[in-house]
Image (cartoon, rainbow, N blue to C red):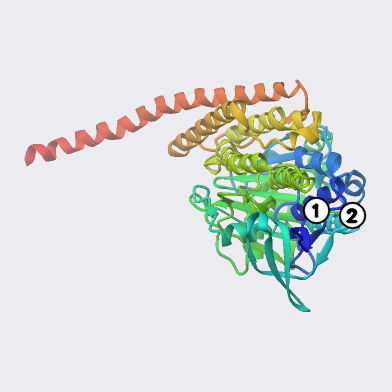
Amino acid sequence: MEFDYDVVIVGGAFSGAATALMLKRRHPAARVLIVERAAEFDRKVGESTTEVSSCYMTRILGLTNYLGHDHLAKQGLRMWFGKRVDQQFDDCVEVGAHYQARLPTFQIDRSTLDQHLLDLAIAAGCELRRPAKLARFELNGAAGQTVSITTDGGEETITARWIVDASGRAALLPRKLGLFRSNTEHPINAVWARFTGVKDWDSYEWRERFPEFANACRTSRSWATNHLMGNGWWCWIIPLRGGDVSAGIVYDSRIFTLPEGASLSQRLLDHLLAHPVGREIFANAEAIAGDVHAFSAMPYWSEQVCGDGWAVVGDAAGFIDPLYSPGLDFCSYTSYYVADLLTRQLCGDGVNDRLAYYNAQYPVMYRLWFETLYKDKYYYTGDAELMSAALLLDVGSYFVGLVIPVYRDPEKEFLHLPFEGAAGRVFASMMKFYNRRLVALAKRRLATGYFAHRNSGWREMYDGFVPDARVRKLIQKGLLRWWKAELTNLWLIFTGMRAAAAPREQSKRSEAPVAASL
């Protein structure tokens, strides 16, 4: 059948532009239309890339030079834990790497990255309608999809063999088709802004005031993704090219409530200043007016992500949590997979098995990624011992399961969604087990008053994660810390029972005379 376009992609940001670009590179004859609602892109929540998404951008999309010239090289992630509001900065616990990151990762400004990718897609031959809004659509499988869009010039009706939803959190197709689901098991919210006047973590002033702190680290703390950690919440601090700093809080509404304040930006700033590390960093900071945002009920997913003639990619398919910056990982896997699927179909291959795989494996990937890394995690984010154990085990597992394979053969591995097959299920079971145990240990510590007991007086610097057998040393360190926490838990059970028994015995003795008189 003859259609106006082979593919209409709704959304021109990262996932939509990457899908279009890969499709045109592999099948230059493909007629691709990108429909982008915004006249210009805005900044997104979180601007850090991981090793997997960086591999996609550098090895697959070929953005190495662009990222190196126009964004910042990310120097890993660091976590900071405090015990009291009045705690001294250099007494807080710091967990992070000694040295520079071993693999390319970046602190990116999503608005400029999205625009650059869209420009590449247009240069490759894609057409663009912008600003344009999807008014309605009709899915008819092999008979073609009908899309009506509105622009300044009026309404336009287009037919295409495929429609790809890359609309981000708007999730246009999942919502219209009744497939959109909120992840109510993970009730997290976020508030974030851009700040000026944020102190340089590596300044000469800090070297004079805290020489031991300055000498402990061989890389740049300023160019890392720094995290302030607390009970039921964490804050990110991400530098951007040009001097602005992105900072925000993500919190579990079951555990933490952001205090009220005069404005959203002031509430966020007040919270940052309440952490002893944040107080040093943000003492003279100011939020940029008009660049303050909030999201509630952040996690969601689509029960189905494709069908004959349609597919969903990136954040339109689902989102879990910004901790560890997995959002662009999901975008990388889904955009690459769908671009490959579309290429095969337009070249005449049957793709029913690939559609079935995508529909079956995406919910598995989403569910297991959530259960292994994030389910109830905010119960222990504020305890330095427990969270540092999780960091070593989480990132170590990520390297073994995803980073090492994807760097070995990116074109092959991006066609296999994470947690695939029996091996993926076994790996997920192990990760879910230690996460459940850390949650249980945290609840015991909270109940006994031991939570965050060791959030002062120590610093842990490791060599950094690498995509080879050396990562096992960090996993072993995480296992050792977890097992030590289990021993502490046994001690808390024993002493807690004794402490609880004393009030009960005292109560019985005091009640005995009353019972006798009755």
Q: How many marks?
A: 2
Q: Secondary structure at mark 1?
A: helix
- Quadrant in which the N terminus is drawn: bottom right
Q: CA distance from mark 1 to mark 2?
A: 9 Å
Q: Nearer the viewer, residue 415 or 437?
A: 415
Q: Residue at x 78, y 48 (%)?
A: 346
Vertical arrangement, residue 210 with respect to residue 288, above or below: above
State yes or no: discs 1 and 2 in contact (Cβ < 8 Å).
yes
Query: Disc 2 marks which amino acid?
Result: Ala
Name the spot of residue 210 as percent of width and height, x first: 78, 40
Residue nearest the viewer, comparing 174 with 161: 161
* Residue drawn 44% across the image and 36% down it: 448
Q: Residue 144 location in percent, x, y?
A: 68, 59
From this viewpoint, is residue 474 visible? yes
Q: Is residue 198 above or below residue 222?
A: below
Q: Quadrant of the C terminus?
A: top left
Residue, disc 1: 20
Q: Is residue 270 visible?
A: no
Would you name the residue on which mark 2 appears?
124
Query: In this orientation, which residue lies closer to the viewer: 357 or 484?
Result: 357
